[in-house]
Amino acid sequence: MDIKGKVVIVTGASSGIGFILSKMLTQNGAKVALVARTGDILEKLSKELKDSFPISCDMSKENEVINMVKMVKDHYGRIDILINNAGRGYYSPIEKVDTKILHELFDLNLVGPIVAMREVIHIMKDQGEGRIINISSGTALMYIPNMSIYSSLKRALGAISFTANEELKEYNIKVSVVYPTLTDTNFGKNAARDPEIQFRTTGTMIPDTPEYISEKIIESIKTNDTEIFAHREMEENRK
Ligand SMILES: NC(=O)c1ccc[n+]([C@@H]2O[C@H](COP(=O)([O-])OP(=O)(O)OC[C@H]3O[C@@H](n4cnc5c(N)ncnc54)[C@H](OP(=O)(O)O)[C@@H]3O)[C@@H](O)[C@H]2O)c1
């Protein structure tokens, strides 16, 4: 899909990948609805980005997600692309999982994106076209100790996306999954964690920049690819 002039919802636009992605989409001529909880950052960003629309929304709250989609439709008159990017990590061994955090993550990393999809689909069907990009994680395809909850929710998001893609083919609505790996954002700082797990294990992996991940997300919109592995080192090794 060509991005120029398109209305795009970016969740998690106040930091990291979503923040940079919103800027890059605007540079590509998109009109971006900037969604996150931290309204003052979104207001400031919106002043920089032509035709953008800041919306404070907690993506783990169904009523707020429904209202957010309605606000975007009322403001721009259409919604072409949804990018479900807001998310949070959780580092804990299974034997110490805190079910309160588990439920919070379930609502944010899985239910929120599903509700947002549900709410935009009928709008996209009426328009005869649409794109949904769900940001998963490379960890969804791995078995990394202490990351079971986060990884499995991201894996579930992928499975839902592929099924939705099949369901929506006849309506010209494409659903894709992007898998970033370690990326230099506030993700590690913002993640919930068991107190005994202080540091994120990165091994020898070189973090990608949010600019690189955003380029891959934009590429996926343009190419209509279903699965995009956003990992520079892996890409360079393949050459
Ligand atoms: N960084 C990595 O290494 C990495 C690797 C693989 C996948 N990912 C995925 O990439 C996505 C973006 O993460 P990031 O690395 O950019 O992390 P980040 O810098 O921590 O940004 C997370 C974003 O999500 C938003 N968010 C968190 N809770 C929210 C809520 N309840 N409602 C609405 N927005 C909420 C935050 O905004 P507010 O706090 O203002 O609400 C922020 O804008 C996530 O889905 C993450 O799982 C990241």
Image (cartoon, helix red, strand yellow):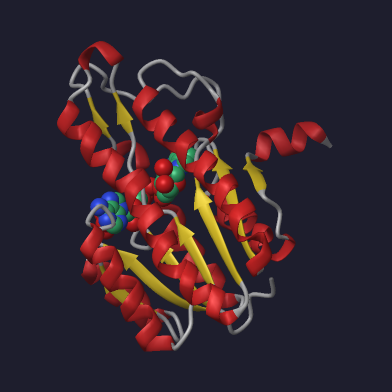
The location of residue 229, given as percent across then percent down, is 64, 41
Left or right of 221 in this view: 23: left
The location of residue 212, given as percent across then percent down, is 60, 51
The location of residue 130, given as percent across then percent down, is 59, 70
The location of residue 14, given as percent across then percent down, is 33, 62
The answer to whether 15 is drawn above or below residue 200 in the figure is below
Q: Answer whether residue 156 is visible to the viewer in this image.
A: yes
The answer to which image quadrant residue 186 occupies is top left
Residue furthest to the right in view is: 239
Left or right of 25 in this view: 99: left
Residue furthest to the top in view is: 95
Q: Residue at x 65, y 63 (%)?
A: 221
Left or right of 40 in this view: 174: right
Q: Residue at x 54, y 57 (%)?
A: 133
Left or right of 175 in this view: 182: left
Q: Residue at x 32, y 24 (%)?
A: 199
Q: Answer whether residue 26 is visible to the viewer in this image.
A: no
The answer to whether 166 is drawn above or below residue 120 in the figure is above
